[in-house]
Amino acid sequence: MQKHFLFVSMVLLTATGLSAQDNDRQLTALILEKDSLFWHTYNTCDIKGSEAFFSDSVEFYHDKGGITLGLDALTASLKNGLCKQPEEFQLRREAVPGTVRVFPMKKSDVIYGAIISGEHYFYIKKKGEPERRDGWAKFTHLWLKQNGGWKMTRVLSYDHAPAPFLSTRKAVVLPADVLRRYAGKYKGPQTGTAEIRAVEGALLVAAYGKEFSIYPEKEGVFFMKERDIVFEFTNDNKLLVKERGEVAEELVKE
């Protein structure tokens, strides 16, 4: 009889555990869907649509912009800030893949809310300019069940920093004698003197008391992997340094 009781108890516990796991999975899917819908309204400056996701008493904490309390104040900040002139300036948010997680909030095994957190990038588009990735930050949002629905009640945006640059350029292999053509000392008004040496598969640039590598995209054109900077060697012994496509400095070979 005791063995039978233990067996039934184990089955019930297992079933309860599976049910809890199913509930957690369903909650995760629900919050991820709501999160996706909210960010769509954010990216398109649909302020009326965004309002529907917040509680009236929402609290927004930003590590650079301070505290915003209440739905009216949050809505006003969007109208007078990011969405003031969408035809002139647009900000788009995009989650960093693999960083977003949902955490159920429970009391006595009953779900009352959820936390979603992760990392995201911010892209800026100004009128007449291509979109560029500008910033990175972490976020944490608290969703609570309210009146049969789900509302964001606490929003934290923090650890803001410039977005890490990810180069889309592909390095090619140039013969060692070709790399050596670009070696030497180059002088410019901002950099002063930069010394360039040929190393295996790349060029090593010494400037500002530091050294960094640049990689060949093709003959005469090299790039940095860490920043959007391109180095173009011309036939008249000049070196053009371009940042984001614009010439930042012209150096002359000594």
Image (spheres, rainbow, N blue to C red):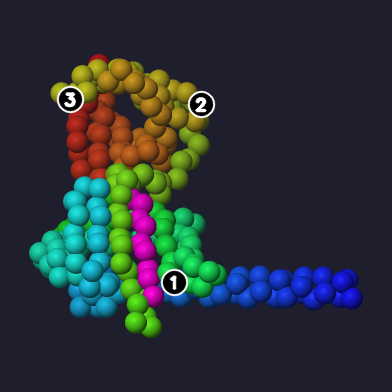
Residue identifier under label 3: 190
Q: Residue at x 29, y 47 (%)?
A: 160
Please tell me whether mark 1 sits on a helix, a strand or a loop. strand
Task: Tell me the quadrant of the picture where the N terminus can be found.
Answer: bottom right
Residue identifier under label 2: 200
The quarter of the displayed image where residue 179 is located: top left
Provide residue 184's location: percent of width, then percent of height: 34, 18
Type of residue at label 3? Gln
| Disc 2 versus disc 1: nearer the observer | 1
31 displayed left or right of 4: left
Residue identifier under label 1: 112
Task: Tell me the quadrant of the picture where the C terminus can be found.
Answer: top left
Is residue 217 found inside the magenta-colored segment of the image? no
177 displayed left or right of 17: left
Provide residue 87's location: percent of width, then percent of height: 13, 68
Type of residue at label 2? Glu
Which numbered disc, 1 or 3, marks the residue that appears first in the sequence?
A: 1
Look at the picture and state if 49 lies above or below 182.
below
